[in-house]
Structure formats: C-alpha cells, structure tokens
Image (cartoon, rainbow, N blue to C red):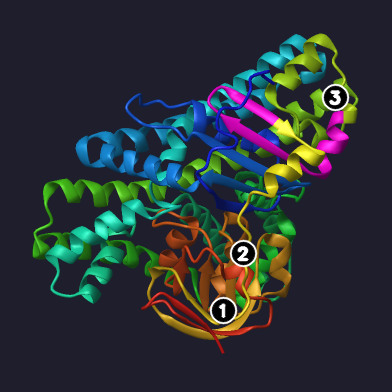
Amino acid sequence: MLKIKPKFLNHPDEWMLAEEIPDSDIFFFQVPMSCFCSNSSYRFLKNYKRVVTHYKKFHMDFYFGEKDSFEVAENILHACLSRNDFGKNLNHNIVKWSDRLIQNAKTTASLPLHQLSNKELWVLYKQQDDIHTKLYTYGWLPVALDMFHNNFTKKLKAYLYGVCDTKDEAESAFITLTTPTQKTIVAKEREDFLKIYAKYFKDIKAGKLPPLLKTALAEHSKNWGHLGYIYAGNVKPFGVSHYFKELTDLASTGISTKTLLTKEAAQLLKAKKQQVLLTKKLKISKLYQIQFQSARDFAITKLYRRHAQLLHLYLMHQSLLPEIAKRLNLTRYQVQFMLMGEVKKALLSGKNFKKTLKTRFKECVLYTEKDLETIYTGREAKKITATFKKFNSKNITEFSGQTAQPGFAKGTVKIVFRAKDMKKFQKGDILVSVATDPDIVPAMKKAAAIVTEQGGITSHAAIVSRELGIPCIIGTKIATRVLKDGDMVEVDANKGTIKKL
C-alpha cells in the first residue's frame, strides 16, 4: 500500500453508482480498479481519475465520478470511430489474454505448492496478477464504452435515426445489427449439455441417474461448472446435482435436442442474413459497418473473458490462495481481502495483517487512483460513504431502460442476484437483477421477461436474452430498488418500460 496522499478523493465531481455486485472481494476487484485508473494498453486512451469500492463483507458497490466516467467513455468512443482497426485489435487481445489467464491458472493449480518457498508462492501470485491485469487493460474498455452512460449505443442509434424512415425502424435495426452471429461461450456450454440430454433422454425422463450419466455430468461440471462460480468463491461451482435438475426440468417439457439445436442454429443464420440485407437496404457506411461488427464482437469476447476469469478464480481458490493462507495462518477469505502489496509483505517479511483484516472484512472502502490503492475502515470509511448519493424509490410505479430484446410480458417479480436465489423462481416469473451472470442462466431460461439495472448492448443479459428470445430491458439503474419479490409488473420491452400493476 503506497503512502501517497490521494489527489482526487475530495474532487467536486459527484460520485455515481457504477455497479452493485454481491459476492465480491478485493483479490479479484483490485485488478479492475487498478486498470480503471492506472493501466492501459493504448496510450491514446484516458483512465478514470478515481474509483471507490465499498465492501460490507462480500457485498460491494463501486462508484466513479459522474462527469469523469462520461468523458472516459467518449474518449473510447472516439478511438472506435477514428481508428478502423481499434475494435478488432481490442477483441483479439481480450481472447488472447483470456487464454493466457486460463493456461496460467491451470499450470499453477497443477504444481506441488506445499513444496514451494514463500518467495516462490509470491512469484506465482504476482504472475497471475500480472496476466489478469494485462487482460483487463483490454477487458474494461468495452464495458466503460457503453455500460454506464450508453455512449456507444447512443452513437449507433443516432446514426440509424439518420438512415431509417422512423424511430421504430431504427430501434429494430439497432437490435438486428448488434445481435451476435457467432456462438457465445454460454451457447457452447449449452450445446455440450444438450448432447448429454439427447444421449440419456430415457433415463432423464424417468428421473434416473445411472453411473454413465453421472460420469458424463461430472465431466461436464469439470469443463463448465465454473460458470456458476462467482468472484468471492463463497458458493460452489455447478455440479452433478445442479445439471441433473436442469436435465429433468428440460425433459418435463418433452422438447428434443434436435429441435433446440436446430432452432438456435437457425437464429444465428437468420440474424446473419438480416444483417446483410439491412446493411444493404440502409446503405450503412463502411465506418458504421465496422462499429456494428465491433459491437457484436464485444458481446462475444466479454462472455469469453468472464469464462476465463471465473475458471481462473476457481483454480486459484482451490490451490494458490489456500496455500498462502496456510503459511500466513489466515483463512482463504482473509487473504482475498488483502492488497497485492500486503500479500508480498506478509509472505516475504512476515508482516501480520490478522487484526487489520478482521476489521476490514466487516466493512471497508478501497479507494483507487493512478498509482495509488488505499483502504479505509471505521470513521474514515463512513466519511467517504456519506458522500454517496442516496436513492428514494417512494412513489415510483413506472420506469424505463434500454431494450435488449423486444417483446411484452406480465408476471410476478422475483429478484435474482445469484444461483442461490433461483429456488424461488418459477416458469413465467419476471427476473429482476442488478446484472445477470452465467450462474443464473437456468432462471433466465424460465423467465417471461428479464429486467436489469446495469448493462449495455454487450451485457450478459442482452446477449443471453437474444439467444433465448426472451423480452429484456437493461440499464434501468433502479429496478431492484423499486421492485420487490411478489410485485406484479408489465414489461414492455418494445418501448423499454416497466410498470407496476
């Protein structure tokens, strides 16, 4: 932890809630926060002046300066429009460094860590942090471009308003032109899952779990279970019982694998044909053809990055972090609330952080700006959180967001943050969340509609809702604070509105 006085902590730019993320820790999120402020693989891009993360145990909110975050997004947008190869290069590097993160995690997890010295453990810890940081110097850019102020979306729509006859035509064209035409990593998992479904359909239909099916599901869990594993690692990855329940739920519908796979393949082909026809009909300029292609690729690479990060986390939580915790006489969760510099001091110099971590885990604020990370607790933390804008949801009965997938639905609200919340979810419910993640896809498949607070055109909710053909509104900013379990709502994803009934 550097002993440098913060420059921008009391800057007049008002704090804006960027995202609320349950099941979070410092081990994972110090990487994004440092990249936001200090790291970039493109020297022509701006970084945020400051970012603050507020933890209450594993629950995290993080904030940017409102004007600052808008200016950063505009800067990235300018790069997209002025450099024809920017989006392509960015997406290439996200995939490249995602693969390297996976390989590093697998290599580290295979080592006899108990035989290594503290210095060797520190080298491994720094190595994984360096690779993850490099990945995120690319990975944060598509998110910052569109998630917080919809800069990319607004620019693309403004262009379409100029080449379409009506606003409705432009909105429809936007959805068509930003829909991915390649399989996402989530779709690839589903394809593997459906092959198991087809092979063992009779047993599944009868509710039986014979040894060969159990083995197949165990292998599937090994390959894909990390998609149900979230940042802090305080829940288990998806296992055999989870996938078997999904199979039996699917079998109860009577639908065949062939029907599902044919439908999904047809959707991709249809989307591709529609994009070609629409591009020709509207005479989309070469510049904007590149932008729409980048938007589609951002959606693919964002999910691929998330896949890599979750697998990396799972392997680190099973190998390197427990070994470090053992050496330091700490729990793994305590190690997950240490800054990288603190891990170095503890391993190499024997510094004891036990008392500090006990206080920090209850509640703390991680403040980050260029070349500075510092953690506040107690009164100092409360002084910072007191500057955050408070939200009053009283008397709000209707609100809006951005259409990710058009459609209309009425139903009962169920707030779903994580996989543990899915047990209350019934087919036909309205799924409401801060932002969806791969762990709640089973509930998304049952939803009549999906509503999220966060998101942009490359968000998980936007991508998956289009793959599933489920009405979806993203970027409402207030959904989980206005709605509660049991509320009856009308979701008009054609207009982007949600109304309490």
The quarter holding residue 176 reads: bottom left
Q: Earlier in the sequence, mark 1 or mark 2?
A: 2
SS at circle 1:
loop
Query: Which residue matches tag 1?
Result: 396
Query: Which residue matches tag 3?
Result: 353
How far across and how far down the image is residue 324, in percent? 80, 23
Examine the structure image and report whether residue 284 is included in the region drawn in magenta.
no
Per the rendering, the mark at residue 391 is 2
SS at circle 2:
loop
Q: Nearer the viewer, residue 233 or 206?
A: 233
Give the answer, above or below, for where 92 lies relative to 237.
Answer: above
Q: Is residue 401 left or right of residue 286?
A: right
Give the answer, above or below, for where 244 lies relative to 20.
Answer: below
Q: Earlier in the sequence, mark 2 or mark 3?
A: 3
Q: CA distance from mark 1 to mark 2?
A: 11 Å
- Quarter of the picture containing the C terminus is bottom right
- Quarter of the picture containing the N terminus is top right
